[in-house]
Every structure is written in C-alpha cells, then in structure tokens.
Image (spheres, grey):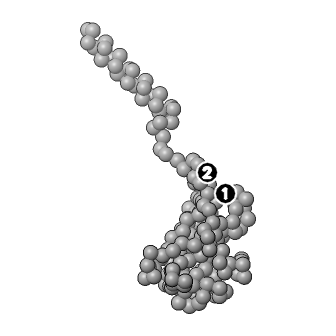
C-alpha cells in the first residue's frame, strides 16, 4: 500500500509541474515579439527621387524576372496588407534611372508582394534591384539586394516596418 501512495504522489507532482509550465508560457510557441525594423541599405535610394510615386503596374516591361518578398510590422511580425512597394532596376529593357524601369505593387493579405520585370543585368559590376516602402504610415525604407549571380531569374527582399 505504501508503494502505490508514493506512485500516486509522484504522478500528482509531475502533473502539477506540467500545469505550472503551461500557465507560465513555457509550452507556448515562439513568437515574433521584438522583431527589429529593417534599416535602409546604402545605395537603396539611387535613382528614386525622379520617379517617386511610380504607378502600380501588373508588371514592369515584358517581364521574365520576379522580384518578391514580404512586409511585416516591427515588434509583433504581423503581415501588412495593402502596402505599396516601389521596385526598379537596371534591366535588359532599360537603365534604373529610366521611368520605364520603375513600377509599384501592393502586398496581399499575407503581406507578400510579387512583381514581374525584365531580367536584371549588372551595373557597376553588381546585378541588383532597388525597392522602397514610402507610403507614410510607416518609416521609409530603401533596399538594394544583390543577386548571387547575373543568371538568377528572381530576387527576394523582406521589409519589417516601424510606425512613422
């Protein structure tokens, strides 16, 4: 009889520990609390000023290359829908300072964006794109991601925005 009491006590103690851990948050999944905002990249705003506010377009030029990414809120990491992202690059169809090389798109309900554009080609020795968030609700951010290879047919960039 003594052995069964000890087993029951151990079971109750273990169960109590489990409940305590669960209520303390130790069993909850990790969250994006404290997600740091994206910092603008050097050179990200090159050739932007003359084409600020480029129109929202279904694609830039004839397409063939995909620029995509996500937009989330700093701190909690929530996806931000309906955010305007301007994109431009030096491509097979035009230089990055040409108006025809600029366009914008909006994020979907998951904070994702995707815009087809002509193939990016190197300028100043680097194949790279330019992206901007500048709609005003959040702080402006400019990105200038570099492709691993000039033969890549896509490039991703991700924004984490903080309120303006």
**Residue drawn at x 56%, y 77% as measured from the top left:** 129
Residue at 69% across, 69% down: 134
- Reading the image, the residue beneath label 1 is 162
Q: Which residue is mark 2?
A: 75
Left or right position of 70 against 132? left
Decide if residue 83 is in sight here.
Answer: no
Looking at the picture, does residue 29 appear above or below residue 6? below
Label 1: element kind: loop
Residue lying farthest to the bottom in this orientation:
93
Q: Which percent across, then down, holds residue 137? A: 72, 61
Residue that appears at 61% across and 51% down: 75
Q: Is residue 88 above or below residue 20?
A: below
Depth check: 112 or 159 in front? Answer: 159
Q: Is residue 42 left or right of residue 24?
A: right
The percent coordinates of residue 74 (x first, y second) are 62, 55
| Residue 159 in picture, x, y percent from top left | 59, 63
Q: Toward the viewer: 145 or 12? A: 145
């Amino acid at each position: 009889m003594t052995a069964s009491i000890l087993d029951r006590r151990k079971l109750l103690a273990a169960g109590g520990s489990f409940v305590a851990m669960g209520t303390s948050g130790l069993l909850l999944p990790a969250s994006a609390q404290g997600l740091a905002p994206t910092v603008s990249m050097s050179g990200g705003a090159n050739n932007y000023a003359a084409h600020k506010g480029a129109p929202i377009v279904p694609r830039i030029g004839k397409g063939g290359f995909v620029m995509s990414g996500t937009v989330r809120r700093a701190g909690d990491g929530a996806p931000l829908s309906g955010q305007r992202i301007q994109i431009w690059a030096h491509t097979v169809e035009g230089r990055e300072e040409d108006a025809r090389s600029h366009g914008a798109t909006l994020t979907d309900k998951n904070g994702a964006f995707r815009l087809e554009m002509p193939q990016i080609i190197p300028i100043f020795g680097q194949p790279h794109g330019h992206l901007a968030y500048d709609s005003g609700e959040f702080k402006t951010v400019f990105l200038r991601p570099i492709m691993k290879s000039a033969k890549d047919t896509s490039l991703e960039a991700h924004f984490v925005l903080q309120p303006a």
